[in-house]
Image: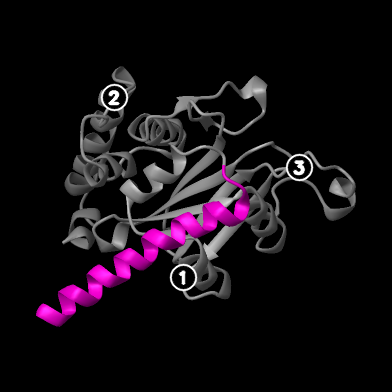
Amino acid sequence: MIKKTLSTTKGLDGLVSQKREIAKIAAKNLRFGFDDDVRTFLKKMFLLAPAAYGRRMENYMIEKAGLIRVSPSEDRGDSRNDLGAYFEGKISFKDTRGSYSLIQMRPWQDLSGYYFVLVDPDNDFEEMYFYLTKTEGIWEAYHAGHTIHGTKKVVAGNKYNSRKIELKEGSLAYERWLNEYRVPDFDTLNKILNKKPFDDEKRVLYAKKYFKKLHKKVKKVKKHS
């Protein structure tokens, strides 16, 4: 169907016109999609250019989690709760190569942890939620990530270099994230983000406790199906 549409001038012009109209609607409304459920919101964002949806998705997650946006001048992530915990959050759509890109990781920032949402457009925009403590986030940034700008020689010794983590489906890093950092759903992530700043060990145990609860539910459903 889509190949046929792209092969005709009329079909192609129609797609371009629709995309343009959606962009105009979003440009006039900074809260475009904010009243929708997560899945519908993500689908709407996917229709926009990255420059248009990046900040919106951050604000949506911050608002949905009941967090407070942090000023860039604080250099402590992008959000905090009212108990003194600071976080950096990232949302990434899977690309056509099967990879998720998490950019602008800043290891020097004083944070309590990182939260990530990976979205699969090929599976009805299913979301996967992850929470990493500060220690885990820094480890991943240096072991599974790389610098975004400059050569190794240029960035050597400079701690103020942002890093990028790329997770490709089926890779060792991707499997590690699924096994060690994934939390079952947004409600679980929300509970983690709105607790007092735990140390790394307690925060990991807190996440794993809910992950085990999820597995019990799955086993119960299978047993009765």
Under circle 3, the secondary element is loop
- Residue 225 in sight: no
Residue 204 horizontal/vertical position (percent): 53, 57
> How many C-alpha atoms fall within 10 Å of the one at disc 3: few (<14), some, or many (≥20)?
some
Circle 2 is placed at which residue position? 24
Circle 1 is placed at which residue position? 169
Residue 124 horizontal/vertical position (percent): 23, 58
Residue nearest the observer in this picture, 136 or 202: 202
Q: Is residue 4 left or right of residue 169?
A: left
Which is more foreground, mark 1 or mark 2?
A: 1
The residue drawn where x is 90% and y is 46% is 157
Under circle 2, the secondary element is helix
Q: Main secondary structure of the magenta part?
A: helix
Residue 179 horizontal/vertical position (percent): 48, 70
> How many C-alpha atoms fall within 10 Å of the one at disc 2: few (<14), some, or many (≥20)?
few
Amino acid type assigned to the residue bearing label 3 in the image: Asn
Amino acid type assigned to the residue bearing label 1 in the image: Glu
- Residue 186 in sight: yes
How far apart are labels 1 and 3 at the CA level? 26 Å
Q: Is residue 223 left or right of residue 77?
A: left
Circle 3 is placed at which residue position? 161
Under circle 1, the secondary element is loop
**Does residue 221 belong to the magenta stretch?**
yes
Residue nearest the observer in this picture, 101 or 106: 106
Amino acid type assigned to the residue bearing label 2 in the image: Lys
